[in-house]
Image (spheres, rainbow, N blue to C red):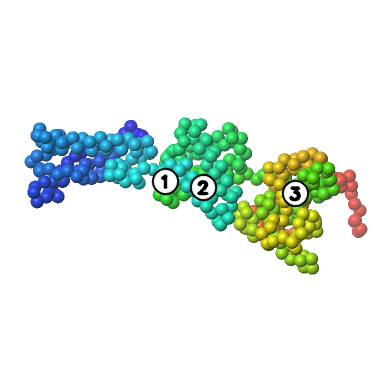
C-alpha cells in the first residue's frame, strides 16, 4: 500500500433527519484518499447533547458512557475490517469498508485457487457432455502446478485473484520452465490455463484489469515425429515370442492407418464401425479431445487387425473393438519395440497419428481437406502443420536428387 494513502473515520450527527423527539441519527463517515461514504450506526442523540469537537455524547452519565462505548466499538470494528481488507488488496475503497462493516460478503475478494477449483469441478460434471476427461485432467494438473508455485515462492496456499499480476505470471512461467522442466510449448499451455481463470474472473467482476496484457502466449513450431513406410514395414514384419509386444505392434499400426489417438481407439465401439464386406467399412466417431467428427475408411491392414481381435457380427453396439493396454504400458512397450526394430525415434502412441497424417495420406497424394476430415480436426489450420512436414520432405528429396545430378555437367539438346 502506498505511503500516501489516507484513512480516516469521523462520527457526526445528521441534522437533516431529525426525529420528532428532537434526536438526530449518528453517522460514521469513512474517508480513504479523499473518497467518502457514510453509514448509520443505529444510535440517536439530541444536538445539544452532542460534542462536535470530540465526536461523542456529552456528559458522564451511565447513558453517555454506554453510548460512547458503543461508538468506540464501531470504530474498532472499522479499523479491524480495514486491516482485513488490506490483506486481500491494496485498493481498499470506502464502499468496500462500509460493506465489510455491515457484513456484506462482497467486500472480500475471491481467491484464485478457490475460483480454479470451482472451474475444475464444473469441468468434471460436464465430462462426456461438453468436454472430455482429458480437458478436466489438464485444468486440474495446471491448478496443482500453480498452487505448488504459490507454496514455494509465496509460502501461501492461495492468494487474492487481484494479486495475480504481470510479475507473478512471469515468475510462474520461469518456474514451469526451470523447476518443473517444461518445454516452451508445455509451459505456454499451462499459462493459457491460468489465463482462462483470470478471464473468468474478469467476466465475473472479481478482477478489473487483465494481468496477461503484454504477455505473449504463442506456441513454437515443433517437428512432430512420424514413421517412414520402411520403418512401418519393419514393425509389420516384426514378430515376438511375447504376445504383449505383438499386441502393442498391432494397435500402433492400427492407428498408423486410421489416425485415431489412443483414447479414441480405447473407446472405439461396434456402433462406430459402419458398412459391410461389399461396400467397405468406415469408422465414424467423434474425437474425445475436441468432439470433432472423424470419418475414416478402413483399409485392408486396420480391418485385418480388427478381425484378428473381434468378430463384428457377435458384438453389441456398445462393445469395445480392440483390447488395448493402458497408455502408460503402450508407450513403455513401444520404446522396446523401437529398439528391437532398429527405429531411431522416440516412439510413443501419438506418433501413429502423425504417421497417418504424413506418410500414409499426404505423402500418397491425399488432399489436405480429406486428411483434415479423417483426423477429426475442426478447422483445416490444425492440419496444415502436416502439410509443411510433407513440403519439407519434398524439398529434402529434391536436394538429394540435385546432389545425384551434380556430376552431369551438360546436356546437348537437339537444335543447340
Disc on the earlier residue, 1 or 3? 1
Quarter where residue 225 is shown: top right
Q: Position of residue 157 (x, y in %)?
A: 46, 36
Q: On the image, numbered disc 3 is attached to which residue?
A: 252
Q: On the image, numbered disc 2 is attached to which residue?
A: 120
Front disc: 1 or 2: 2
Q: Is residue 239 left or right of residue 75?
A: right
Q: On the image, numbered disc 1 is attached to which residue?
A: 207
Q: Position of residue 178 (x, y in %)?
A: 59, 33
How many discs mark residues in the rendered view? Answer: 3
Quarter where residue 310 is shown: bottom right
Disc on the earlier residue, 1 or 2? 2
Disc 2 crowd rating (10 Å Cα; few below 14, some 14-19, many 20+) is many
Location of residue 41 with respect to 295 vertically, above or below: above
Q: Quadrant of the N terminus?
A: top left
Residue at figure coordinates x 66%, y 51% from the top left: 263
Secondary structure under the numbered disc 3 in the rendered image: helix
Secondary structure under the numbered disc 2 in the rendered image: helix
Q: CA–CA distance between discs 1 and 2?
A: 19 Å
Amino acid at each position: 500500500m502506498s505511503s500516501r494513502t489516507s484513512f480516516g473515520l469521523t462520527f457526526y450527527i445528521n441534522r437533516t433527519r431529525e426525529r420528532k423527539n428532537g434526536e438526530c441519527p449518528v453517522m460514521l463517515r469513512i474517508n480513504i484518499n479523499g473518497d467518502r461514504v457514510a453509514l448509520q450506526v443505529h444510535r440517536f442523540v439530541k444536538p445539544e447533547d452532542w460534542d462536535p469537537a470530540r465526536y461523542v455524547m456529552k456528559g458522564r452519565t451511565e447513558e453517555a458512557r454506554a453510548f460512547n462505548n458503543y461508538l468506540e466499538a464501531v470504530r474498532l470494528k472499522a479499523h479491524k475490517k480495514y486491516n482485513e481488507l488490506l490483506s486481500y488488496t491494496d485498493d481498499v475503497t470506502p464502499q468496500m469498508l462500509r460493506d465489510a462493516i455491515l457484513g456484506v460478503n462482497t467486500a472480500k475478494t475471491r481467491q484464485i485457487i478457490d475460483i480454479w477449483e470451482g472451474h475444475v469441478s464444473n469441468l468434471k460434471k460436464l465430462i462426456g457432455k461438453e468436454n472430455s476427461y482429458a480437458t478436466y485432467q489438464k485444468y486440474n494438473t495446471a491448478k496443482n502446478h500453480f498452487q505448488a508455485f504459490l507454496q514455494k515462492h509465496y509460502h501461501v496456499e492461495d492468494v487474492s485473484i487481484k494479486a495475480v499480476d504481470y510479475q507473478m505470471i512471469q515468475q510462474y512461467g520461469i518456474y514451469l520452465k526451470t523447476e518443473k522442466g517444461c518445454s516452451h510449448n508445455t509451459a505456454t499451455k499451462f499459462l493459457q490455463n491460468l489465463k482462462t481463470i483470470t478471464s473468468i474472473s474478469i467476466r465475473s467482476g472479481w478482477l478489473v484489469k487483465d494481468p496477461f496484457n503484454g504477455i505473449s502466449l504463442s506456441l513454437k513450431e515443433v517437428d512432430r515425429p512420424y514413421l517412414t513406410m520402411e520403418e512401418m514395414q519393419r514393425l509389420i514384419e516384426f514378430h515376438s515370442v511375447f504376445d504383449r509386444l505383438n499386441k502393442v505392434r498391432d494397435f500402433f499400426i492400427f492407428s498408423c492407418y486410421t489416425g485415431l489417438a489412443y483414447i479414441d481407439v480405447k473407446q472405439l465401439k461396434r456402433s462406430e464401425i459402419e458398412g459391410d464386406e461389399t461396400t467397405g467399412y468406415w469408422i465414424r466417431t467423434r474425437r474425445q479431445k475436441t468432439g470433432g467428427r472423424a470419418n475414416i475408411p478402413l483399409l485392408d491392414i486396420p480391418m485385418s487387425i480388427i478381425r484378428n481381435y473381434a468378430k463384428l457380427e457377435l458384438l453389441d453396439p456398445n462393445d469395445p473393438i480392440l483390447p488395448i493396454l493402458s497408455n502408460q504400458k503402450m508407450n513403455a512397450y513401444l520404446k522396446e519395440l523401437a529398439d528391437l526394430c532398429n527405429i531411431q525415434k522416440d516412439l510413443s502412441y501419438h506418433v501413429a497419428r502423425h504417421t497417418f497424417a504424413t506418410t500414409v495420406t499426404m505423402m500418397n497424394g491425399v488432399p489436405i481437406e480429406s486428411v483434415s476430415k479423417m483426423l477429426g480436426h475442426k478447422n483445416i489450420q490444425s492440419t496444415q502443420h502436416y502439410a509443411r512436414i510433407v513440403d519439407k520432405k519434398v524439398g529434402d528429396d529434391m536436394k538429394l536428387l540435385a546432389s545425384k545430378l551434380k556430376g552431369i555437367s551438360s546436356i546437348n539438346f537437339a537444335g543447340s
